Amino acid sequence: DAGITQSPRHKVTETGTPVTLRCHQTENHRYMYWYRQDPGHGLRLIHYSYGVKDTDKGEVSDGYSVSRSKTEDFLLTLESATSSQTSVYFCAISESGDRYNEQFFGPGTRLTVL
Amino acid sequence: LAKTTQPISMDSYEGQEVNITCSHNNIATNDYITWYQQFPSQGPRFIIQGYKTKVTNEVASLFIPADRKSSTLSLPRVSLSDTAVYYCLVGNNNDMRFGAGTRLTVKP
């Protein structure tokens, strides 16, 4: 399996608090992605990174920010968590920036915002 | 971006071949077709990808007709461990999105 870890794996927080999720990879892949998955939906892209300090928005980026200061780490921050951000968050990595090519996914973080 | 339509769920029995069809009528010439598998409490895992005709790897085959408006993922001789959600994605180098997927249940 690709070397991708996510932390924390589970988190419960309250509305209005800041939350940061971490994705760490050992594959030295250039591209990293954050998705969210909600019941009845597939995965939706929040933000992605195409290199250190290079990031861009996905289809559901409102309320989220990201940072990538090192190749191996991609952070997702909810500045002020809302109940609508209760979800399972997946990080993914890929060697190629072509979105149709294989992405390797992490184990996910289950976030509950009360 | 082409919209994909898959059955919500399918049932099968161990040892059978399973075919999951995905409809993508508005596929563009620069779009590829990719399938992922997702087990409960895990991230999706890439299964197979194709552009046209047939692609086969060690776990599945992907059949794409000439008009590319649909595709069929074929899983030979499924086992209980193939119970999962299967996603058909259509997209290009700039955008590719997951749909709701097909929940496959393999019964003994």
Image: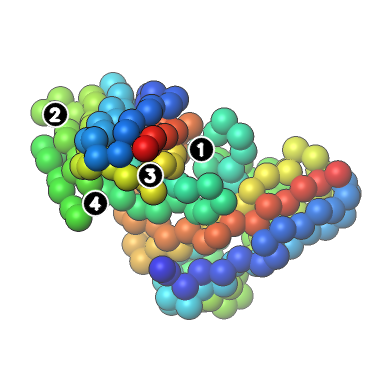
- Residue to which mark 2 is pinned: B65
Kindly indicate whether the residues beneath marks 3 and 4 are on one polypeptide chain: yes
Location of residue B96 in the rendering, given as x and y in whole percent from the top left corner: 40, 42
Comparing labels 1 and 3, the label whose residue is closer to the camera: 3
Of mark 4 and mark 2, the one earlier in the sequence is 4
Instruction: Identify which amino acid the numbered label 3 is placed on.
Output: Leu
Instruction: Identify which amino acid the numbered label 1 is placed on.
Output: Gly
The chain that hosts pointer 3 is B
- Marks 4/2 in contact by CB < 8 Å: the verdict is no
Whole-number angstrom distance, CA of label 2 to CA of label 1 = 25 Å
Give the secondary structure at mark 1: loop
Horizontal side of A36 relative to B22 (left or right) equals right
The answer to whether A54 is drawn above or below residue B75 in the figure is below
Of mark 3 and mark 2, the one earlier in the sequence is 2
Kindly indicate whether the residues beneath marks 2 and 1 are on one polypeptide chain: no
- Residue to which mark 3 is pinned: B80
The chain that hosts pointer 4 is B
Give the secondary structure at mark 3: helix
Whole-number angstrom distance, CA of label 4 to CA of label 2 = 20 Å
- Residue to which mark 1 is pinned: A42
Location of residue B38 in the rendering, given as x and y in whole percent from the top left corner: 45, 47
User: Where does the C terminus of chain B fall, quadrant-wise?
Assistant: top left
- Residue to which mark 4 is pinned: B59
Q: Image point 62% across, 38% down: which residue? A: A38
Q: Image point 84% across, 53% down: which residue? A: A13
Q: Image point 47% across, 48% down: which residue? A: B39
- Marks 3/4 in contact by CB < 8 Å: the verdict is no
Give the secondary structure at mark 2: loop
